[in-house]
Every structure is written in C-alpha cells, then in structure tokens.
Image: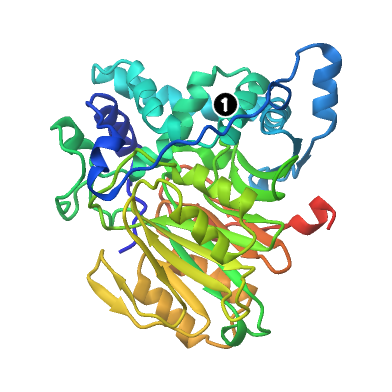
Amino acid sequence: MIKHTIKTYTFLFAVIVFVGCSNLPNRYDVMGKIGSWSVPENELTLEQRTVFFNHRSVEDVLAKAQIIETKDPAYNHIKVIVMKGTPYEMGFQNGRLNKDDIQKNVYHIIGIVKAYANSKGVHEDAMDEVYELIAPFIPIEDKEEMRGLAHGSGIPLRVIHWLHAIPELSEYAGKKQFLRGKKYKTEKPEKGSLADPDLETCSGVIAFDEATKNGELYHLRVLDWIRELGAQRYPVIHVYQPNKGHAYVSFSYAGFTGCFTGMNEKHMAFGEMGYGNRNFETLEGVPFVFLFKKLLREADSIQAALGIIKDSPRTCSYVYQFSGASEDPAVKGMMLVSDYRRFETLMDDQEFCDEGDDQCYKGINDVIFAGHSTGKLREFMVNNYGDHDLATFKELAKIAAMKGNVQDVIMKPETLEAWMVNASNTSKDEEGKACNQKWYYFNFKEIIGQ
C-alpha cells in the first residue's frame, strides 16, 4: 500500500527525536559498493544572492511581486503569491508579503516540535544536526530562497531550516536503526505500529486520451498527512517567475518553500507519495520537496524529469507521477518508483505490484494510478472509463482520501488550469476532509500572462 507515513503529530515529533539523537552515517561511506555522488559547487554571484537593505532596494524588490487574497472562508482564505526575480528575492517577497501567516504557521509547528523534543531531553541542536545532514544536497537556489524567506518574514533562518527538514524526516523509516548504529531500515514494520506504512498514505491518478470524456488530461494528487498540525489553515499557491528557469506553481502552505505538488509553464505536472518499501532508505540526498522544485525549474518533458531524478542523489522510497509534455506524443503520463538505489518506471498499460499489500494490479490504457486502496482506485477508473472529467476526478478524490486528507489538487497541465482544496479543520472527522470542501479554481496561464 502506498504510504504517507505518520498518522499523528506524535509520530512526527518522534521522527525529530530519533534522528536528532543519533550518530548519522556518512553517505559516501554508505554508498561505497555502488558508487557515490559528489555535491556540485552550484554557486550564485553576490549580486544574484543579496538584497541591500536600504529603503529603495527593498521597495524595488517588493514591487516585482504581488499577493492575491480570496478573503473567503469557503476556500480557507487561500492566498496566491506571485514572485519574480532571483531565488533570494522571491523568498524575500514571499516572507514580507505573507509575513503574519508565515509567522503563525511556522512558529506553531516548530513550537510544538521543540516542546516535545525538550520533554524527551533532546536539545534543539539535534534539529540542526538533521539539517546539516541534508544541506549539502539541497540546490543552492532553494537555500537562497529559504534565506530570503527568513529575512522577509523576520524568522531566524535556523527555524526555517528546521521546518524544511520535516517532510523528508517523516518519510524516513530507519530512525531507531540509526540509534543502534545501523545505516538503513531493513526490518518489516509491525502491522498497526507507528512505523506501519498503511497508517497514512497519499494517492495519485492520471487519465488522458481514451480514458477521458474529451481526451483531456487530468492529474489528481491527494495529500493525506497530519490535519492536527493545522498547516491547512494557511493555504498558499506560490507562483514563481524566476530570472533563470521555467515559471512554475507550487500548491503549498505559509512559510514552506518546498514543493509537494506543482506544475510548470512547460505543461508539466508533478505529484508524489511515499512508498511502502522501507528498505535501504537514507537521508543523505536531495529531499524530495527540493527535488520537485528542481524539476519544476528545469524539466520540459517527462523524459527530462526522469533524467534529472536519475542523476540526483536520492533518499527515501517514493512514487512520483509525471504528466503533460513529452518527447513521445504517445506518452502523456508516467510513474516512477524510486529510492537511493532503485529507479523503476511504469507506463499506463503496465502491471503495478504494490509492495504494501503484496498485490499486483493490471494496468489500464491511458491511466496511471497508485495510492491508498489502489484496488478501489482501479475499480473506479475502469467503471467510468471513457467518461472521466473534472466531476469524476472530484469524486475520485473522495474515494482516495483518508482521515488525514489535508489537500487535494486536480491539474490540467495541457491548459495550465488547476483546482485546489484544503481541509477545513484540525480534527479527523469526515466533514472536515479536504475532498469535502469547496474547490478553488486557479488559472496559472493567466497569472503568468501566456
């Protein structure tokens, strides 16, 4: 069963404790038998990196950006922040334009993490140790954006780093093994335990050509995570128009610059979910939230995205789904199962063997599917084959969603349209799940003026 790890924030905080206390292995020692990756010196010039903090320069930087607020409780007050310039400038714009929400969200999450860690006798320096482990593999553009965000929002950069380490940590399965000096998780988790991959999962489905009513391409990404943390109270659509690289959109939350779900101007859409295979996971690689940012900035086809991931140092077990632009007109969607040493691609008509439930599912022409209750996803797609459209994909989100359904996004990369919805509360009730809220329509094409 595809997993998205933790069910409660208690487990999330345990992640911090387990990893922070441990003697973390060096990736280059671990990778000895199959080769190792070097960390590129991807530097930016001082002019690209720095905003001089006099009145005029700050105003000039902010004048390139804008914030669009729905001010509508039906949409959880979604904000669209349009940023332009260097990575540092875009981070600074984000931090300054959405300062209040960023401070509320970041300090709330980190405050709970610190309190829990302190209650277990773990000093906050442990969080620095975790970030230092992944830092060499984070692209310089993303480091600069985090630095700009910190300056713009008034939050210490150290705290911003802690926040962005959480997603990869929450996927990593070998926390206790680290404490015992082992390099990788190799034991199968006990059913029903906090390490059980079936506790929380994500899902994703892509359909196109003969599978849809008008041959249109739809890409659903269902994010099941931790509603109790309350990030969904501050939903943000981040629109990037960088000086270098493609324009892209990331469906996110206040204060978080990484990407869970996104689409770029080259008509590419990206979704992710953790995978149930816990063997041979490592933290020494590019965290997936920054790997997605790299894909959004650089990839102009499914094949290019695959090449970027293959050439990158990878970490935990994930399933990636790509849709949209392709070098092969017959290929409009693809799925990738990947960890630090595995790289397995799946086409629409190929059988998918889910390692979580030990079942294999026959492929469907012009459909890519995986997630929680993979069998139910397949059944729905088959039963409505040829009639899939926006309405059926909204229904599909309800079939896929678990109690921790935080966010759902339906993307149409060919037209650069999207629909986004977020959970309405921090409980685990059915009514508050993201899939049961009002969908917010977003036209990326109009925003970037294509």
Instruction: Tell me which residue sits at (59%, 79%) in the image.
Output: 208
Q: Is residue 439 visible?
A: no
Instruction: Tell me which residue sits at (52%, 85%) in the image.
Output: 384
Q: How is the image coloured?
A: rainbow
Q: In the rendered view, does 368 fall on the left or right side of 146?
A: left
Question: Compared with residue 298, is residue 30 higher up or lower down, i.e. above or below?
Answer: above
**Three-letter amino acid code of the residue under disc 1:** Lys
Q: In the rendered view, does 186 fall on the left or right side of 376?
A: left
- Which quarter of the rendering shows the N terminus? bottom left
Q: Count numbered badges in the picture.
A: 1
Instruction: Tell me which residue sits at (82%, 18%) in the image.
Output: 57
Instruction: Tell me which residue sits at (49%, 19%) in the image.
Output: 158
Q: Nearer the viewer, residue 20 or 290?
A: 290
Asked which quadrant contains residue 142, the reply is top right
Asked which quadrant contains residue 287, the reply is top left
Tell me where residue 418 appears, x and y as whole percent: 67, 61
Q: Is residue 426 visible?
A: yes
Tell me where residue 144 appears, x and y as whole percent: 61, 28
Tell me where residue 77 appears, x and y as whole percent: 68, 42
Q: Callout 1: helix, strand or loop?
A: helix
Which residue does the numbered mark 1 point to in the structure image? 104
Crowding at label 1, few (<14), some or many (≥20) Cα neighbours within 10 Å? some
